[in-house]
Each structure stands twice: as structure tokens, then as C-alpha cells.
Amino acid sequence: MTQEAATSEISNQAHGDEQNHGGSLLGPLLCWAVVFADIGTSVYYVPGILYGTVGPLAGFFVFLTMSVFVLLTLKYAEVTYRFPQGGGVVTVAAQAMNHWVGALGGMFILVDYFLTAAISCLSGMLYLSVVFPAIGPLALWITIGVLILLGILNWVGISESAKVSLVGAVIAFFSDIAILVMVFTHISLPYFFSLIPTMFANHSLTPLSILIGFAGSFLAFSGLESISQLSPVMKTPRKKVASMALLLVVLTIGLTSPLLTILSTLLQPKEAADLNLSTQLISLLAGHWGSVFLQTEVAISASALLVFASNTA
């Protein structure tokens, strides 16, 4: 198939998708909600994982990887525009190289989606069991039930699913902002800046540690692929909608993830070093500098967002 024929076929498929979905097409805000509901979950477990491998340098690596994340969003905006039929990197690999490479990438991503759906949903239930301990013994069965409900929700329509994700994404984002506000009302900016040198105290940066830190911190920004899967149900012009949605993603993630990682690890070194407590660093930060109410709200919103990450998968 020639490049012109492929382009014509893609254009026809995209036009057909627009007619089929009609009024269910997603704008920038709903696209942001779906992507944030995926990427936004990372802040609840990445700080603990990173602290276990690179120690106090966790915040530094998340901040460093943020620059790569910004560059990736630019590329994904282009992929979304050039391949409106969806497929993301799978479609790109199939057309740029060959169908076997695209198929291999598709199989890897399918496995990743299945694992993400199961693990995120189960993690959400376990996170919720902190507030409602009775859920603990039934977490597996509740997870299966929630996955079935999510399947029904997506069968009803992607627009309805995205609107549900919007509610969870907005609540989670403002919960993150509330934590930052509470912390910075108790500590001064000079004290915050004095924490930065402690990240590098007794920790040398070697090529191996940089590689490990980068790999681990990239978990904080995983999930960007979901924007390209929304191409068939995205309003036109897709380039503008995708660019606006990804700009919102960069602003919201950039404002919350690096700061929360730095604060949750440097202000809570003992908790970060504990295998059990390290999975709850954000809610512990909310409880220590805020209130029990904020801690409970963060635990519930984190659980909800993890479920929405499963929904995105």
C-alpha cells in the first residue's frame, strides 16, 4: 500500500468514526480527565518505590524526568493528529516498520493493559480498606465486581465513562492541591529550599544510579499512551484538542507530582523507609500536615483514581 493510499484510508476511517460517535466525541477537558485518571495515580505509589531504590533522591529524579515527559507530550500530540484511527505507537510501528513489529508492540501493550486494569483496581480496593477495614478480606471479589461494572460502563459509551473519570480526576487534583497548601502553610519557602541539599547529602550520582532513578521515576509519568487511544472519539480539530488536553496534563502533573514526591519523602524519611507505610506516603502527608479528615479524603480519592486508572486501561 502506498503512502497516499494509506493516508486516504486513515482519513476515511477517521471520518467514519466521527459520524458513528456523533455527539459522544470528547473535548479537551474530558480527554485530560481520562489521561490524568491514569497518570495521576502514580503519585500514590511512586515516591515509596523510588525511595526504596534511590533514597532521598526520589524527588530529584521525578523533577528531572519531568523534562522528558514534556517532550513526550509533544510527540503524542503529533501521533494523535497523524493517526486519528487510534492505536498510538502500535500504529506508528506498523506503518513505519512492518506489521509484525506493530503486532508485537500490540501484544505487549495488551498484557500491560490487562495488568494495569487488575493491579490498579485491586490497589484501589486495598487503599480504601485503610478507611474501611471490612473491605480487606473481600478485596479480590470486590475488585472483580468493579471490573465488571467498568466493562458495562464502557459498553454504554466512552463519553459516559470519560465523564465519570472527570469527577474522579478533578477531586484527586484538588486533593493534591489541598495537601500542598496545608504543607506550605506550616513550612516556609526558605525551609523548603533548605530541604533540597539534603537530597544529595551522602548520595553520589553514578551512571548506574542515574539509570535506576530515571527508570523508576518514569513510573510517575506512565499512562500518556492513553491519549492516542482516544483519537477516534476526539473532537476535531484533533491537533488542537490533543494539544490543549496534553497542556492540561503537563500543568496538573507538573504542579503536583514533583512537589508531592519531594515533600512526602524528605519530610517523612522514616515512613518512606518503611515497607508498609511507604505505600501510603501521600495520605500520611495529608494527615500529618492537615487533618484526619483530609487524610481520609485523600485515601478515598486515591482509591477512586486507581479505579479510574483501571477504567482507562
Image: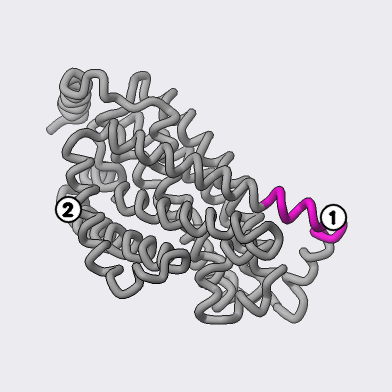
Within-10-Å neighbours for mark 1: few <14, some 14–19, many 20+: few
Q: Which residue is mark 2?
A: 103
Q: Which residues are magenta?
A: 180-193
Residue 209's x, y, as percent?
59, 75
Q: Of label 2 and label 1, which has the lower sequence position? A: 2
Main secondary structure type of the part rendered in magenta: helix
Instruction: Tell me if residue 283 comes above or below residue 171 in the rendering.
Output: below
Question: Which mark is nearer the camera, 2 or 1?
Answer: 1
Q: How is the image coloured?
A: one colour
Q: Amino acid at mark 1?
A: Ser
Relative to 90, is 166 on the left or the right? Answer: right
Residue 290's x, y, as percent?
68, 57
Q: Which residue is mark 1?
A: 188
Instruction: Tell me if residue 174 comes above or below residue 127 in the rendering.
Output: above
Q: Amino acid at mark 2?
A: Ala
Asked whether residue 181 is drawn in magenta, I would say yes
Instruction: Tell me if residue 60 comes above or below residue 251 in the rendering.
Output: below
Asked whether residue 263 is drawn in magenta, I would say no
Kindly identify the residue that appears in the image at 62 percent across and 55 percent down.
Answer: 258
